[in-house]
Amino acid sequence: MKRLSLAVLLSLTPVVAQAWPWSQDMANQVSTKPQESVDPANPGMTVFPKRSVPVPGTTTIVKDSAAAEKLKNPVPADEKSVATGARLFEIYCVVCHGKEGRGDGLVGAKLALRPYDLSAAQTRERSDGFIWGYLTFGGAVMPTYGNDLSPTERWHVVNYVRKVVQRAQAAAPVAKK
């Protein structure tokens, strides 16, 4: 009987230990919570300045690629946008699409389906919204970049693809067979 009582007591010990004060240490630690200021004199999130206006092109809400295809590019394809797009293209796109956007990147070469040739005529005929939507929602082998790139950053990549990748291919001489 003593052994049975001891076995029951030992089996209930972990249940009792969960109620002890040190079992909540991780939940009750000192930390900064989201939207909480580290400055005690100014608690909470910084408010937007009075009379502030959202910047065009930074917020784009679409539910799928079909809706994105109808979007117009709100970011002008100026030198700064194309330069930003080039930097982002190198970080996120070159591994699959290659430096020239032909779908011959190091990772793209190992995939069962070859990544899109961004310089090909079929891609040039698509709308800016289509490319933006593909970046946002992904595709057959392409991951989604909706969480990694802001809407404006995705438009910068579109501008880079249009102004540099596709123009370079269009200007390249056609190889004769």
Image (cartoon, grey):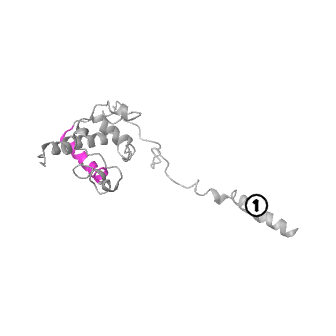
Residue 87 in the magenta stretch? The answer is yes
Q: Is residue 10 left or right of residue 168?
A: right
Q: Is residue 172 left or right of residue 7?
A: left
Point out residue 32 in the picture as x, y percentages from the top left corner.
49, 51
Which residue reaches farthest right?
1
Residue at x 31%, y 36% (from the top left corner): 130
The quarter in which the N terminus is drawn is bottom right
Q: Amino acid at mark 1?
A: Leu
Residue at x 20%, y 45% (from the top left corner): 165
Write the start and end of the magenta stretch as one range: 77-94
Point out residue 135 in the picture as x, y percentages from the top left corner.
34, 42
Q: Secondary structure at mark 1?
A: helix
| Residue 2 to residue 33: above or below | below
Q: Is residue 177 left or right of residue 133?
A: left
Q: In terms of secondary structure, what is the magenta stretch mainly?
A: helix
Where is residue 118, by image quadrant? top left
Towards the viewer: 4 or 64: 64
